[in-house]
Image (spheres, helix red, strand yellow):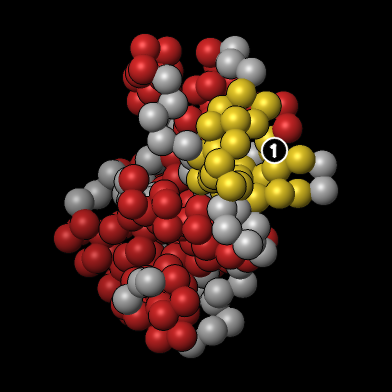
Amino acid sequence: MPDTFLNIPLNQISNRNLPLRQRTDASRLEDLVNSIQRFGVIEPIVVAPSEDGYQLVVGRRRFEACKKLGLETVPAIVRRMSEERARELSYQSNLQIQPLNIADEVDFLRRIDIFHLRDDDAARRMAMSPQEVAVARKFNRLPPPIREAVRTGEIDERRALALTRLGGEADQTRMFRYIRENDPPIELLEEQIDRVREGNAPHL
């Protein structure tokens, strides 16, 4: 069935299944609010029909900006698709706008159950490289507090991924505490991880 273009009441659109980015840049949202207030919604959002209205697929920031402005309707492309296809389209849309934080990316990949596939199969399905899938798989094995620290910016992705060289959660958590307390450069962190793996860092 071809796409349909409609002006849809905001109260008929749900975005509860679209939490890709866990943090919203307030300044960028405010810029979008000002732009829509002046020029209107230039690019329609994408929605899929649902039992009680429509499910938002692409355009979360535009949707939030319209709500903030108190608008009653938003221009939308209505596209019939499966829930799995809607999630994949949302994921690709986010990548085209701005690369996802790896924590948000891995949360999404976990929700669509991609990690049971081989790296090359998952890469073809998600338009990623096998290397990117392998990195996401490593990050997925880290304890939740470490993944959340990356999402909030408490530690960077490179140092978090260095922790995947440690085999056990206890060692990863211990080294994570060391990062929080000392903020070591990546070179020093790699040295300390080598010492932990060799059993030569009892004080950490």
Percent across and percent down for residue 19 are 58, 45
Q: Nearer the viewer, residue 94 or 35?
A: 35
Using the rendered image of the protein, determine whether residue 149 is visible from the camera's viewpoint. Answer: no
User: Which residue lies under the disc numbered 1?
Assistant: 14
Q: Amino acid at mark 1?
A: Ser
Count of marks, rendered view: 1
Residue 37 vs 28, above or below: the answer is: above
Note whether residue 59 is visible. Answer: yes
- Could you tell me residue 179's position as x and y percent? 35, 49
**The C terminus lies in quadrant:** bottom left
Dot 1, crowdedness within 10 Å: few (<14), some or many (≥20)? some
Q: Secondary structure at mark 1?
A: strand
Residue at 65%, 50% in the rendered image: 48
Rendered position, 120 above or below 59: below
Report x, y in % for residue 138: 43, 72
The answer to which image quadrant residue 10 occupies is: top right
Q: Quadrant of the N terminus?
A: bottom right
Outermost residue toward the right in this view: 51
What residue appears at the point 51 percent right and 39 percent down from the top-left corner?
45
* Figure check: 10 above or below 197: above
Q: For this rendering, which residue is in front, 28 or 163?
A: 28
Residue displayed at 37% across by 53% down: 95
Return the x and y of residue 139 as percentages of the image width and height.
Answer: 44, 65
Lateral position of residue 37 relative to residue 71, left or right = left
Residue at x 69%, y 38% (from the top left corner)? 14
**Residue 78 versus residue 120: which sits nearer the camera?**
78
